[in-house]
Amino acid sequence: MSLTESLKKTSLYDKHIALGAKMVPFGGWDMPVQYEGVIAEYTQTREAVSMFDISHMGEFVVVGDCVESGLDRIVTMSLEDLPVKFARYGMMLNDNGGIIDDLIIFRMEKDKWFLVVNGATTEKDLEHLKSSLNPSARIEDVSSVTAKIDVQGPLSRDVLKSIFPGIEKLEYYTFDFFNYLSKNILISRTGYTGELGYEIYLPWDSIDVLWNKILEDKRVRPAGLGARDVLRLEMGYSLYGHELSESITPIEAGLGKFVDFGKEFIGKEVLLKQKEQGVDRRIIGFVSDNRRSPRAEQAIYALDGTEVGVVTSGTFSVALQRGIGLGLVDHGVVKKEDKVLFGNEKARSEASVTSRIFYKGGSLKD
């Protein structure tokens, strides 16, 4: 069996092929990386509306009181005070404080929770949840029957409100249920691009109808994972397997604001120690002095040539017309506005350490 044959496909696979998408392996799935081009799709998202097939993501439903079920202890964010129809971002940690996965949890009802996790880690996440939840909890893996499309861009609300009346009432990090094809589907407003956007979760066998319906609006074009990566990196958002892993803690990843130290959670003692004593490494942002883009796993050097870290993500920023990157570096070695080098022993480029948020505009909270 070839690699292509062994990859999982979303139910929109044939649509992507018909639209001329370039398909690539991603987390065990055959996914569209681009259609007309990364820069064109990036610009479309920043200026109008793009639609992404994100059906490779994993989804679980957990039923039970968040504390009694053990769910609240599994994640870093507080769930007790999360209102119904609100969502919250956080992480699941191992005993050493390393990040098993990052996720968004939606409170569907008082004791009913919808968890959205990364596609490549779905099986691992499910095993962790099953082994960590109390027997009183019920968990169902609905990944194989749940499709997901993201409609992102400053005009996304205008496009969707004719299909889903009332969607304009959704505030940032909230969701609601809407009727479509006589089915009750969940639509959230969280985003991963820095622009106003909505995430639509619906039955696997219904997604093609909605996909076609949304594309009837000439303001919308399909976009692939290539543009999505540039968009998320300009916002400084973490990607699992790059800025996040089981060997990196939320404190090292710069995500301490998504950890509620006022409650108990797996890995808390390690994080408390890091918070009090500091960490040996941390994630930084940096901008190339030219158009050359850093690449994941390249080394980061001080100006004297000493290796001080590794690039975790890198790309060409359309907004800045410069290469940008995130990197895990030794703590205290470099600070904001310092110069560093990235590359390898043969070729290195100069860059400036900056905020990890490279793109300051966007319609995210409009």
Image (tube, grey):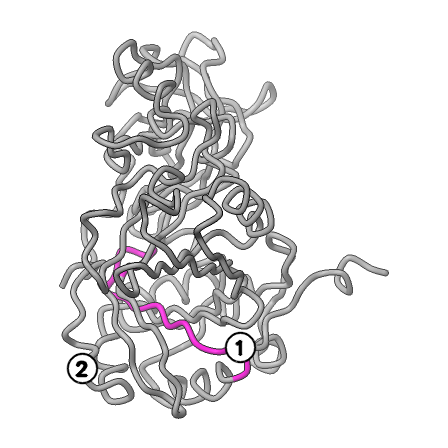
* Labels 1 and 2: the sequence-earlier one: 2
Q: Nearer the viewer, residue 360 or 273?
A: 273
Residue type at the position of mark 1: Trp
Q: Nearer the viewer, residue 68 or 311?
A: 68
Q: Nearer the viewer, residue 179 or 215?
A: 179
Over which residues does the magenta segment extend?
190-205
* SS for callout 1: helix
Residue that protrudes farthest toward the right in the picture = 1
Quadrant in which the N terminus is drawn: bottom right
Q: Residue 159: x and y, percent?
A: 26, 82
Q: Residue 314: x and y, percent?
A: 45, 39
Quadrant in which the C terminus is drawn: bottom left
**Residue at 32%, 86% in the rendered image:** 179
What residue does disc 2 label? 166
Q: Name which quarter of the figure residue 297 lies in.
A: top right
Query: On screen, 181 above or below 186?
Result: below
Answer with left or right where residue 321 lies relative to residue 123: left
What residue does disc 1 label? 204
Q: CA distance from mark 1 to mark 2?
A: 24 Å
**Residue at 25%, 72% in the rendered image:** 176
Q: Name which quarter of the figure residue 336 lies in.
A: top left
* SS for callout 2: loop
